[in-house]
Structure formats: C-alpha cells, structure tokens
Image: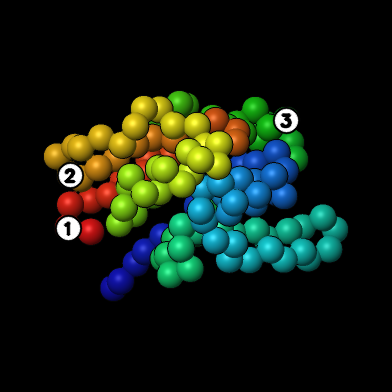
Amino acid sequence: MKKKLGHVTLLVNNYDDAIEFYTNKAGFVLLSDNTFGEGMRWVAVAPSKDSETAVVFVEADTPGKKERVGNQAANHVFLVVHTNDCRRDYSMMKSKGVTFFGEPADVPWGVEVVFEDLYGNRLDLVQHNGF
C-alpha cells in the first residue's frame, strides 16, 4: 500500500499576506485559492507545481490559533523544502527580503540554510547530494 502526505496545515494571520510571502518571496506556487461562502477559504501553496505535499493556510480565527501563528514548531524547523540548487534559491529569496539564519552551508547530506516566513516559522532549504 502506497501512502504519502497530501497537505500540511500552516496557521496564518491573513491569507493574502501569506500568499504574497510564499509566492513572491519564497518562490512557491499558488495551487488553489477557493472561497466557499461564510468566510471559508481553501488556500494551498507548494514549492513547485509537481510537489506531492502542499501547505494549506488556515487563518487563525480563535485565540488559541492566534497564539500559535509563527510558532507551530516552537522555534524548531517546521518544514523542509527540497531544492536542486540551494545557493540559487537563497540568493533569489534573500534579494526579495527573506530572513535567513546564516548562509548556505555544506553539510554531510548536501547544502542547507534555514529561513523564516513572515510570521517567524522556520523552514529548512535543503539541497541533497545527488538531488
């Protein structure tokens, strides 16, 4: 039996701000942005159109959800983004104002650097050896 992750939920303060950051600064693609009435909205982004897993934004609408925006993994990396060129993506994202924790570094498994989204969630940008 084959299984895979389809979606990962990310709490956001505002759908449009999150779309702007992830698509225009982090280089993700917008997969869907649908409204269903009564304020319901389905927004999904992914690193590329052919990604098997998408990030679905959920607008924080309760005090409990609002407390967790930007801190879903307690200052640990929340998501890992695989790329075939970490240094290229780092340069592009940095030029668009994305905050990084250092510069891309060679590690035993390839090249990696950690960045944060507009809310402070940490993401790891990783280029695996042999990607």
Residue 34 sits in which quadrant? bottom right
Three-letter amino acid code of the residue under disc 2: Trp
**Decide: marks 3, 1 in contact (CB < 8 A)?**
no
Q: From the top left corner, tell me how far across and down residue 22 is, in percent.
A: 57, 49
Q: Residue at x 30, y 57 (%)?
A: 84
| Amino acid under disc 1 | Gly
Identity, as a three-letter code, of the amino acid under mark 3: Pro
- Disc 2 to disc 1: CB gap under 8 Å: no
Frontmost residue, 126 versus 44: 126
Query: Is residue 111 found left or right of 79 in the rendered image?
Result: left
Spatial distance from mark 3 to mark 1, Cα to Cα? 44 Å
Question: Residue 100, how many percent across, how many down?
Answer: 44, 31
Q: Is residue 122 visible?
A: no
Distance (Cα) linking label 3 and label 2: 40 Å
User: Can you tell which mark lies on residue 109?
Assistant: 2
> Secondary structure under badge 2?
loop
Q: Which of labels 3 and 2 is toward the front?
A: 2
**How dense is the environment of label 2, judged by Cα within 10 Å: few (below 14), some, or many (20 and up)?**
few
Q: Which residue is mark 1?
A: 130
Q: Which residue is mark 3?
A: 63
Taking the spot 77% from the left edge, 57% from the top edge, the residue there is 40
Q: Earlier in the sequence, mark 3 or mark 1?
A: 3
Vertical side of 68 occupied by 28: above or below: below
Neighbor class of circle 3 (other Cα within 10 Å; few <14, some 14-19, many 20+) is few
- The residue nearer to you, when weighing 114 against 6, is 114
| Residue 76 place in picture, x, y as percent | 41, 30
Q: Earlier in the sequence, mark 2 or mark 1?
A: 2
